[in-house]
Image (cartoon, grey):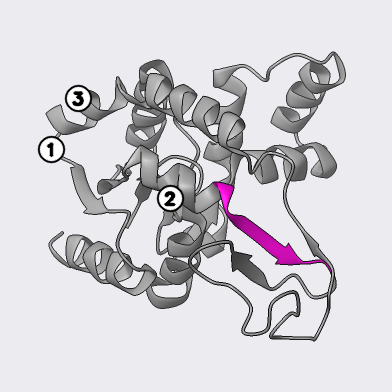
Amino acid sequence: MNIILLGPPGAGKGTQAQRLMETRRLVQLSTGDMLRAAVKAGSEVGRRAKAFMDAGQLVPDEVVIGIIADRIEAPDCKNGFILDGFPRTTAQAEALDRMLAEKGLKLNVVIEMKVDDTALVERIAGRYACAKCGAGYHDTFQKPKVAGVCDNCGGTEFTRRADDNRETVVTRLAAYHAQTAPLLPYYRARGVLREVDGMASIDEVSRQIGRVLDSF
């Protein structure tokens, strides 16, 4: 089964992708990871990508599609894949469909993790982590049992990601919606778009995604 997860930063796509890898034996494909791997391997498409990256330029869509095409030929993708972060535009979606069709494959479902922007800003802006062990906390939803002390390791120093602030999150959400909006009617017209409540608990989102996949 070949899946695309759509959702803004902080919607939990990575968490759900990890669960799908474990329960459905699918492979999560990150375009960034694939680009770096192709460059390191020195493949033809990797060398093309490297030329653009070394020049500080964006890697063209056709090169990214070529890297995805190579990657899904690997044995670990025989059960299917999960794409997260690609495509971002209708042109990329069309190119992806053409490439898959040439291989006799298709996208089975595109799952949009719908979120409430205001609530998502609150969710992301309040995140922080233990500097020692990386355990995650939140100003409102998940405080340490003892203030200032990590439940996991007893550490007393905490860090926040530089981009986990309200202004940056709002900007990232606006960019996501601008990029993704055209993809929704594109995939809806093809009958593969489904929605889940991205603001539900992690387990509930997993159950909703499971029901969607079971219907195909």
Write down the region rendered in magenta: 125-131
- Residue position marked by numbered label 3 in the rendering: 185
Asked whether disc 1 touches disc 2, contact meaning CB atoms under 8 Å apart, the reply is no
Say which residue appears at 73% left-offset and 53% top-offset: 160
- Mark 2 residue type: Ala
Q: Secondary structure at mark 1?
A: loop
Quarter of the image with the C terminus in it: bottom left
Can I make out residue 154 in this image?
Answer: yes
Q: Residue 201 in the image: x percent, y percent?
A: 34, 68
Quarter of the image with the N terminus in it: bottom left
Q: Residues within 10 Å of mark 3 (few under 14, many from 20)?
A: few
Say which residue appears at 69% left-offset and 17% top-offset: 58
- Residue position marked by numbered label 2 in the rendering: 11
Say which residue appears at 34% left-offset and 74% top-offset: 203
Q: Nearer the viewer, residue 140 or 26?
A: 140
What's the distance in space between the residues labelled 3 and 1, CA to CA?
Answer: 10 Å
Q: Residue 110 in the image: x percent, y percent?
A: 28, 44
Q: Residue 122 in the image: x percent, y percent?
A: 47, 48
Asked whether disc 3 touches disc 2, contact meaning CB atoms under 8 Å apart, the reply is no
Residue found farthest to the front:
147
Q: Residues within 10 Å of mark 1 (few under 14, many from 20)?
A: few
Q: Is residue 216 magenta?
A: no
Q: Is residue 90 left or right of residue 175?
A: left
Q: Nearer the viewer, residue 4 or 143?
A: 143
Q: Residue 167 in the image: x percent, y percent?
A: 58, 29
| Quadrant housing residue 24 | bottom left
Q: Is residue 130 magenta?
A: yes
- Mark 3 residue type: Pro
Q: Secondary structure at mark 3?
A: helix
Q: Is residue 153 above or below residue 7?
A: below
Q: Residues within 10 Å of mark 2 (few under 14, many from 20)?
A: many
